[in-house]
Image (spheres, rainbow, N blue to C red):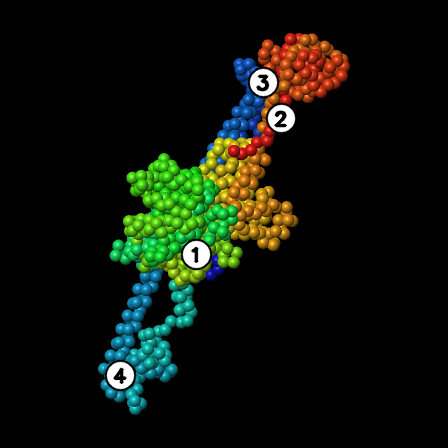
Amino acid sequence: MSDTKDKGNNTGGRKPLTVSRGSSGTVKQSFSHGRSKQVIVQTKKRRVVGPGGAGQGSGGKAPAGGGSAPASGGNKQSKLAEAAKKLGITEEELVARQKVLLQRREAEQQREAEKKRQEAARERLLSEQERKVQEDKEREEAEARRKAEEEERKAREEAEAKKKKEQSRQDRSAAPAGAPAPDMPIPEPSQNRGKKSRKGGNNDRDFSDGGSSKGKGGGKRRKGKLTIASALGDDGERQRSLASVKRARERERERRQSGDEAGEKVSREVTLPESITLQDLSQRMNERVADVVKYMMRQGEMMRANDIIDADTAELIAEEFGHTVKRVAESDVEIGLEGDEDDPKDLESRAPIVTVMGHVDHGKTSLLDALRSTDVVAGEAGGITQHIGAYQVQLESGDRITFLDTPGHAAFSAMRARGADVTDIVILVVAADDGVMPQTIEAIKHAKAAEVPIIIAVNKCDKPDAKPENVLTELLQHDIQVEAMGGDVQAVSVSATERTGLEELAEAVTLQAELLELKANPNRDADGIVVEAQLDKGRGPVATVLVNRGTLKRGQIVVAGKQWGKVRALINERGQQLKEAGPAIPAEVLGLSGAPEPGDMFNVVDSEARAREITEYRSRAERQKSGVASARASLESLMNSMKDDKDVSDLPLVVKADVQGSVEAITQSVEQLSNDEVRANVIYGAAGGISESDILLAKSSNAPVFAFNVRANKQARELAEKEGVEIRYYSVIYNLIDDVKDTLSGMLAPEKRETFIGYADILEVFNITRVGKVAGCKVSEGTVKRGCGVRLLRDDVVIHEGKLKTLKRFKDEVQEVTSGMECGMAFEKYEDIREGDKIECFEVEMVERKLD
């Protein structure tokens, strides 16, 4: 039956479809044979017309009484005039005000409508999100129920199949010999198939092995189609098709990708750093990123997978998803770096670490040379030590002493402080002919701050003007009381050139070391301090280290400050290769990724990954620290600094030195030369030779390059000549600091110095054409010179300050007029002069200034 006919039959029993006004939706039409159809029905509301327009809405006829419109217009006009008269304004002003009020009302209505629209959109978005979440949840539950039902059905089918197979096996075993198997049906002939026996039996025949048939009840009736599987008795275990297996595998793969597990949710321990992205957090929780983002959206936070959240927010999210949280910090990578405390049973005696300190040129290095029987001072530029030297000396008694030779120049204060921090004993060298000097006092302060014992070595006792007693007396002013004066500080008189008193000094050091009972554990991973670092052209970064505990071996992985590397070589102070360096043994380490900062601690780690993790954390922490320090500057401080920078002249410098400690000393020294008007600014300082990148940096910053004990390569020299960059080479720090001081002095603005030269009294004022007013004066004191500075005094009050334009004697221009003579004077751009005024004359000279 056709659809048209069906529709015709069905319309008799129900109402025809009509479009009702006021709503929209769908209507389901039902037809015969179970068919149906969805019809979209759109309804519109009936337009409500006001009383004035009712006639037009029903027929379009105009209202009766054509003159009503003009009459209403006249009434409006009269009402408008009366309202304007009451308010005391014109009709046009009243109309304008009404328009403005109407516009404001419309604007408010629009804002209200926009606000309602936004709220509706927000509510619609939230409801849509909740609906999607609910649909996802229902879909997951339906999928879980479907899988459970499918698994239950499969299990039931397998059980039935096994039961059928067992039953068929039992039937075969129970049948008598020669009888056909009960599950081996024989198809009947086609002419007898489907007919019933007159006696109610079956037309199916069972044949024995010999071909004879049994009349009745010979076996079971065959059901269904005869197949090979049914003939063999394996029809209970029907195999799945290949397409079915593929579909099952595809569903399993989708299930694993979506993370929908049928079992219970596994609670995990989530490790949270101080900050983490949403994607990383979801991976650690083993959750989908979309689920985490949806949760944040429900909390009112529109975030993406790559957005970073803090640890507190991440902890709330993890707990919401049913996981436990373990909070960690980035600094935890350094936990366990220093190792455990040593067992007192494992400690062994070690050599004392002795730091030699004192004023510059008091003989510290010469004294060490006498102890080591070497001549290091001959190789020092200018005869002064400019970086820390570490040596180990073996005495005739077999005892070993490790010496640190620190610079005595004022620029190397930081080096002396480092030397005092790592030492066990301080030998304070004081020249007998010079006494206590500023750097001697500073060395005493460093030693007291480090709380280490002091041994006084009074050097240069062989000189004729040496007075060791005066030195010991001066030390009393700084709380250093030697044993000869009832104190506990040992004092030894020595002479480095004559090699006298060296044995007594060594005995004093050994005695003090025995009192300290210095011990360390050599059978552990090494740690210690970086004494000095440099960038060698042939060997790369080289760090002079002093082992504190353990034994440092070649091939170990070392972390020193922000640098790390595998120890490629260990070299002692004599240039000999070492296989290992034990406690209190200084050595040069090769193989680091860069030159560490002097004073950094070094430690041995077990893997490169750990070393890289520690150094990356330290570099990141330093960058964040510098960034926070710069970000803390407020707007007011920024404006003040900009204002100060306008008044301050900068001298940018690029400093390259042989070792990192020298760079540090130069930077501190030149920055101390700055004042409120001029400032030396080291924009870049590093250890190593001058490269092309240094020249380019100096060119862009308009700065000279100061090279201390290093040289520029050929490419850098050619580039410096091409770009016009000045390179200055120094081997003594005195000369470098003096040059910077002279340059800063040249940048200082000259000082104006005023010199009084004379007074003149105005006797009469003349008004001359084309010249102006000229004062007839008499010089009462000193001298008046043409072009000098003048001040006009009236009743001892300065009225004007300027320059003298004209100086005449009679009618001639003269250079100067002496005391007691009369002359004519005229001022530059000033004519308010009166009889009886006094003129003060002075000269201004510019005097060059120098830094203190």
Q: 482 or 193, which is in the foreground?
A: 482
Q: CA distance from mark 1 to mark 4?
A: 112 Å
Which labelled disc corresponds to residue 91?
3
Q: Of discs 2 and 3, which sits in the foreground?
A: 2
- Residue located at (51% from left, 49% from top): 381
Quarter of the image where one finds residue 82: top right
Q: Earlier in the sequence, mark 4 or mark 2?
A: 4
- The residue labelled by disc 4 is 218
- Which amino acid is tagged 1? Glu
- Can the viewer see residue 772 in this picture? yes
Callout 4: SS:
loop
Callout 2: SS:
strand
- The residue labelled by disc 1 is 573
- Residue located at (47% from left, 50% from top): 377
Percent x, y of residue 243: 42, 69
- Residue located at (56% from left, 26% from top): 64
Q: CA distance from mark 4 to mark 3?
A: 122 Å
Q: Earlier in the sequence, mark 1 or mark 4?
A: 4
Classify mark 4: residues with Cα within 10 Å, few (<14), some (14-19) or many (20+).
some
Percent x, y of residue 145: 33, 58
Which labelled disc corresponds to residue 845?
2
Callout 3: SS:
helix
